[in-house]
Image (spheres, rainbow, N blue to C red):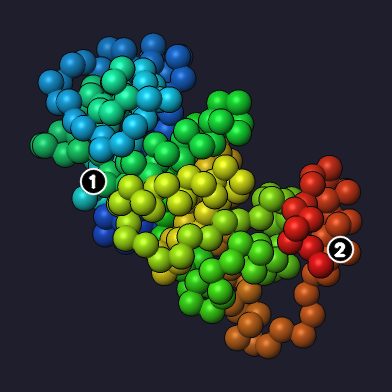
Amino acid sequence: MFIDDFVRMCFDGFEQGWHERNGGNLSYRMTDKDREDAASIMKDTGRHIDLGFDATELKGEYFLVTGSGRYMRNVPLAPEKNIGIVKIADDGHSYDILWGFEDGAKPTSELPTHLMNHMARMSVTDGKCRVIYHAHPANITALTYVLPPEDKAYSRILWQSETECAVVFPEGVGVVDWMVPGSIDIGIETAKLIKKYRAVIWTFHGIFGSGADFDETFGLVHTVEKAAEIYLKARSAGIIRTITDDQLRLLGDAFGVEINKDFLD
């Protein structure tokens, strides 16, 4: 069941060390089959909550989401307390809690950013994107202290740090310079970039990744984090050579992907 896959991803991220305390969050846009499978556990809880922005494009959509102030390490122990299912109301400005979030819990404070990102990715993937994931990987965050907040700078460094990166995210990555998390403003800025990039880095904070399913999304973030780790280790030892732009072009040809030419010299 999709809830099991969701729970697994929460704990996988915790085991990677990406979710200290209550850090990070995950959301999944449910399919019609998911709704059928979960019909027996969903009900009107009477908890109707204002969103604070216009999500009309998502009206009638169901989402499985992590809870505000909840810990990823606890999700497998008590899913009904730490995650929940919400439905975006027909007015597009509010949602109803249909399952989970027991003991007065509510969805993550980053819910506006998640929903804005879902709308953005739906529009550029013909609705195939269903997962939005926010994590705090240490190496990605550390990278933001040594690079300028520019999409090209990050994309090139990551591509050059591990061969598979240009294949996994040939469009590159986006970067949002520091902003207050949980705000509508940071959601808007992230959504602008996630239309172009599947992964968006928040400086001094972490990363947002997106994908069609849990494996794709987790794998994307894992790949970016590993590349960041490799770069930082190589930089500390002293870099004397790296993957060239011509080699990146060869990768694109070999794997049938179009590497962002704006980021190649």
Image quadrant for the C terminus? Answer: bottom right
Q: For the residue marked with disc 2, what is the amino acid?
A: Gln
Tell whether 156 sits left or right of 99: right
Instruction: In the rendered view, tell whether residue 104 sits above or below residue 36.
Output: below
Residue 83 visible? The answer is: no
Q: Residues within 10 Å of mark 1 (few under 14, many from 20)?
A: many
Q: Quadrant of residue 79?
A: top left
Q: Which residue is mark 1?
A: 68
Instruction: In the rendered view, tell whether residue 163 sits above or below residue 112.
Output: below
| Residue 238 picture location, percent across and down | 68, 88
Q: CA distance from mark 1 to mark 2?
A: 44 Å
Tell whether 248 sits left or right of 111: right
**Front residue of 12 and 124:** 124
Q: Residues within 10 Å of mark 2 (few under 14, many from 20)?
A: few
**Helix, strand or loop at disc 2?**
helix
The residue at the point 27 percent across, 55 percent down is 22
> Residue 247 got which mark?
2
| Residue 130 picture location, percent across and down | 50, 31
**Front residue of 169 and 34:** 169
Tell whether 237 sits left or right of 137: right
Instruction: In the rendered view, tell whether residue 235 sits above or below residue 8.
Output: below
Residue 254 visible? The answer is: yes
The residue at the point 47 percent across, 56 percent down is 207
Image quadrant for the N terminus? Answer: top left
The mark that comes first in sequence, 1 or 2, is 1
